[in-house]
Image (cartoon, coloured by chain):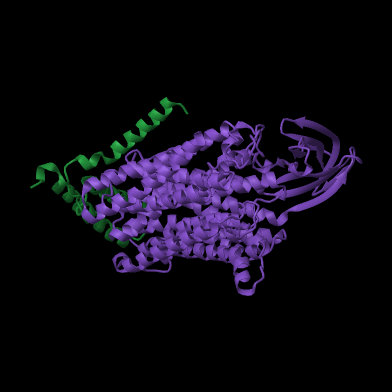
Chain colours: A purple, B green
Amino acid sequence: MIPIVGSITMNLALGFSILTLVALGTFLWTRDSRLLQVGRRLSLGVSSLSILATVILVQLLMSSNFGVDYVAHYTSRETPMLYKFTAVWAGQSGSLLFWLCILSLYALIVVLQNRKRHHQLMPWVIIVLTGIQNFFLVMTNYITNPFMATEADFVVQNGLGLNPLLQNLTMAIHPPMLYLGYVGFSVPFAFALAALVTRDVSPLWIRSIRRWSLVSWLFLGMGILLGGWWAYQELGWGGYWAWDPVENASFMPWLTGTAFIHSILIQEKKDMLKIWNMILIILTFTLCIFGTFLTRSGIMSSVHSFAGTSLGPLFLAFVLSVLVLSGILLIMRLPDFRTKTRIESFTSRESGFLFNNVVFVVMCFAVFWGTMFPVITEWVRGTKITVGPPWFNKMNIPIGLFLLLLTGVGPLLAWRRTSNKNAMRNFTIPIIVLLVLALVLILIGVRGSVLVSFALSGFVMTSIGMEYFRGIRARMRRFQESIPVALGKMIAKNRSRYGGYIAHLGVVFLFIGFTGHAFDQDREWGMEVGQTEHIGGYHFELKRLSEQERPNHYAWIADLRVTDDEGRFVTTLNPEKRVYNHRNPDPDRRQPHSELDIHTMMNKDIYSVFTGIDSEKQVAYFKIMINPLVQWVWIGGYILILGTIIALWPSRRNA
Amino acid sequence: MDWLSIVLTLLVFIGIIIYVIQPLFQPRALSETNGESREQLEQQKRVIYQQIKELEMDRELENLSQADYLKQRDLLKKQAADSIRRIKDESPGNQN
């Protein structure tokens, strides 16, 4: 009976969403405020019902109700409770419902938060958000319904279980983070469209959505980083980013979103770039939906994508409609959004922001082109030509390094124009650091993009350090504060600015980590117990090989003793070779899986993969990689998150 | 699902419908289409104050020239004064 309640709830939500659009449309026609209230209440109903439908699906998964096709496909009796919960987003229909649930949560907050604010905008904001909900409700009601009954003429006793790769704590957090980011951009998009329709050029709504944009950007960034962390910990190829189409799909809106959260500051402070900001937010939201299209259409093959379904054309139609409608609206409103203020000098902070924006968009286009190249070549030539990581690296490394340079240059530029005196004062020390670092690196034999990346990292760190130094010095002079007090108060009183600089420091760490990839080493070998192999200054001795049967898998566990060239003990690694569903009589249903073990140090990771076993000869096969500076990527991620949270944290007055 | 559950579900459903259509039974009122609410004006004032604070900070960090600082400060001061005046006009004592 409960699955039927789930379906009815979703049907009601769809009905409510249509009524919301009718009520608000009529309100805009008649200006009868009662209809606005009805529309608001209906929209709250749509959101509540959508959230309720998700709760029902969770209940069905938790109670192993295999009468529901989705539950039988993605869980089994043996699936641990946590992963029964995460199965909500493991499959196509569940993940769409989960998307709708997050959108509904956001819509609920927006409607309740703005009951007494933005009177002109809110009806349109609700219309846009409900329109998006409506699309997802049509999908989950009629195209891929998560409450569909299992098609079997017998009682299903057990389900297929969750893919072992997804039975990982990171994977439990990664998709919700990504979704929170993707979906979050719906809110600034809705405000932007509402502002376009109502010709609202005031900076107030921009200030309202800045926080939303930052939150969404933060979640999207965290989702991407967690995805990289998961790939690194689980997939066993030793990397965290492969320029896979689905990875790119999340990276593209992050790039335009990054441009947006920078340029929105200029609109707020200088009343500039209004049209550009509209373009950026429309692009970001469209890319979020486009990413969903890429993942679900089946046009791209990726480890992350769902099986090809009929959803593709509908998503594409939705993406095109969003793009065309917003584009037309933007063109119609161009005269209203043009500003008289112009960038006065090439060497101003405003132009620095604009440069950074353009470079982000160029990078996004490069990623888009590379991602879509196989599809484009198939359309044009009839054969699919795929571009791999070398192409993406070749295109994006120079762009990325230019962005890194701008990260350092931006804070050193003055608003409106930078005088020669100012430029000398601000740039001298960072340039000296850059040159000294470059010289040292050249002397130790570092060349090419690695050299540029490390030298620029030093330049940016110095530029950020100088901003902090000048801020602290100013406070110490003015208020006679000690260094820690001045630092604390300076950050507390200018969270947006100094949080932003901390985030930039995180970016530097990320770049240092990415650059470490240039020094990766790997080797593969087969070993018997007692045998020793070596790579990158480390020796690996297989001390023991044990077997263990666990509730949902069978495991072979290696005991690898690692020592360095001087014979000093470094660590013991225990990679495992597992077979899930090992009791299944059908060998095709058994799922092999390699559980890695990684020894992490600040300067490198020792990464071990148990790739296979010949149980008759008792030979175990391993792949060992030495990955320098990977830890810097994760630390950079933490710093980036910390900086963004500081920038986001409301001041006491705003709270 | 037993009868009690069905009745409870129906009651919840009817409750939602009543909540949604309840405003329609209130007297008809036209929505304000122009003008800003007091809260919006207050928010606008806060934005200007924040901008003044940031301008001061930028001057201390020597991120802008003295001439630019004075020009910007005058502009923001004018905007702040205008904002305060509009808030006063909106306050209940000053309503016509």
Q: Is residue A89 left or right of residue A26?
A: right
Residue A344 is at least partly visible in this image: yes
Residue A411 is at least partly visible in this image: no
Q: Is residue A651 left or right of residue A293?
A: left
Please state which of residues A520 and A100 is positioned toward the viewer in this rendering. A100
Q: Position of residue A109 (x, y in %)?
A: 37, 42
Q: Residue at x 47, y 39 (%)?
A: A53
The furthest residue to the front: A153
Q: Is residue A460 left or right of residue A229?
A: left
Please state which of residues A240 and A39 is positioned toward the viewer in this rendering. A39
Q: Residue at x 25, y 47 (%)?
A: A35
Q: Position of residue A609 (x, y in %)?
A: 76, 44
With respect to residue A602, does A363 lie above or below? below
Q: Residue at x 81, y 38 (%)?
A: A560
Please state which of residues B19 and A539 is positioned toward the viewer in this rendering. B19
Quadrant of res A62: top right
Quadrant of res A601: top right
Q: Position of residue A278 (x, y in %)?
A: 39, 61
With respect to residue B7, does A654 lie above or below? below
Q: How many marks?
A: 0
Q: Residue at x 57, y 44 (%)?
A: A174
